[in-house]
Image (spheres, coloured by chain):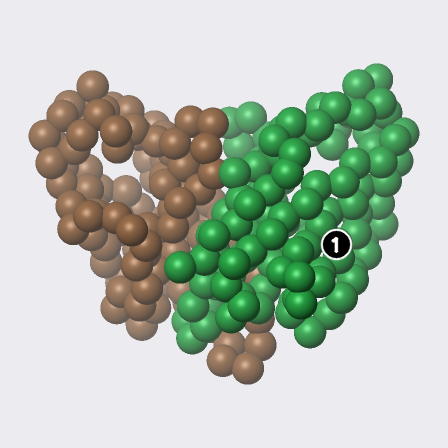
Chain colours: A brown, B green
Amino acid sequence: DAGVTQSPTHLIKTRGQQVTLRCSPKSGHDTVSWYQQALGQEPQFIFQYYEEEERQRGNFPDRFSGHQFPNYSSELNVNALLLGDSALYLCASSLVLFLAVTEAFFGQGTRLTVV
Amino acid sequence: GENVEQHPSTLSVQEGDSAVIKCTYSDSASNYFPWYKQELGKRPQLIIDIRSNVGEKKDQRIAVTLNKTAKHFSLHITETQPEDSAVYFCAASIGRNYGQNFVFGPGTRLSVLP
């Protein structure tokens, strides 16, 4: 049973560039959420995708966008990169159960460095 | 929106002693409270969670308590071991309809001294 997988593990980009990060959810999960974790800080919620639509969004600008595919995998896109976008980007997957609560599991993250 | 506070920010204990980390949340609509352990350079790992309809939950050396009225929840680790050393994050759920999204506390760096 594969857990949450993310690619790439590390990435270096230049200011102003665009980046795409990828996530495959845990087997059986249908919801993907993205978090940004700056060094020494807690994860901050970016947005969540379910049924190929953005369902909830944290306090992040429109430069951050995403997509979910029919197989539940997801991409996070960041445009016009800033130095402050340097962080560990975490993907978490869970299963939507309207009358129950399910755990969320995190991938190993993608370390993005903007220079 | 939801805000989660966590104390202490750092905690050092001797091996075998107990450790307690406390969190408070602001949004009474939050209904799920997980605790994650994160070792340096690794992913956050769920160690225990509690639902809003439960006051206490225990799993071997780890326990969590929830006081919904006061909007407090706490993590208790007994018989600490050096491998318990890590950063611990509490979290509170936000939104209700589509799975789990969280606001995290700022974290507690736990050091267990041999």
Q: Is residue A106 at all visible to an observer of this figure?
A: yes
Instruction: Please name whichever residue, A84 or B46, is drawn nearer the observer in this view of the structure.
Output: A84
Measuring from the top left, give residue A16's x and y in whole percent: 10, 30
Measuring from the top left, give residue B109's x and y in whole percent: 63, 29
- What residue is shown at x 46% (from left), y 33% (from top)? A41
Q: Is residue A93 at all visible to an observer of this figure?
A: no
Instruction: Please name whichever residue, A15 or B23, is drawn nearer the observer in this view of the structure.
Output: B23
Q: Would residue A100 appear left or right of A26 to someone viewing this image?
A: right
Residue neighbourhood size for the residue with mark 1, other residues' Cα within 10 Å, grouped as few (<14), some (14–19), many (≥20): many
Which quadrant, please, contains the C terminus of chain A? top left
Name the residue at the front extreme: B70
Q: How many marks?
A: 1
Amino acid type at image mark 1: Val
- What residue is shown at x 79% (from left), y 52% (from top)? B63
Circle 1: element type: strand
Q: Quadrant of residue B77?
A: top right
Q: Is residue A93 above or below residue A83?
A: below
Which residue bears the numbered disc 1?
Answer: B64
Q: Quadrant of residue A51?
A: bottom left
Name the residue at the bottom extreme: A99
Q: Would residue A112 appear left or right of A18 to someone viewing this image?
A: right
Q: Quadrant of residue A69?
A: bottom left
Measuring from the top left, give residue A29's x and y in whole percent: 47, 65
Q: Would residue A110 appear left or right of B26 to someone viewing this image?
A: left
Which quadrant, please, contains the N terminus of chain A? bottom right
Q: Label 1 marks which chain's residue?
A: B
- What residue is shown at x 49% (from left), y 80% (from top)? A98
Measuring from the top left, give residue A112's x and y in whole percent: 30, 30
- What residue is shown at x 88% (from left), y 31% (from top)? B17
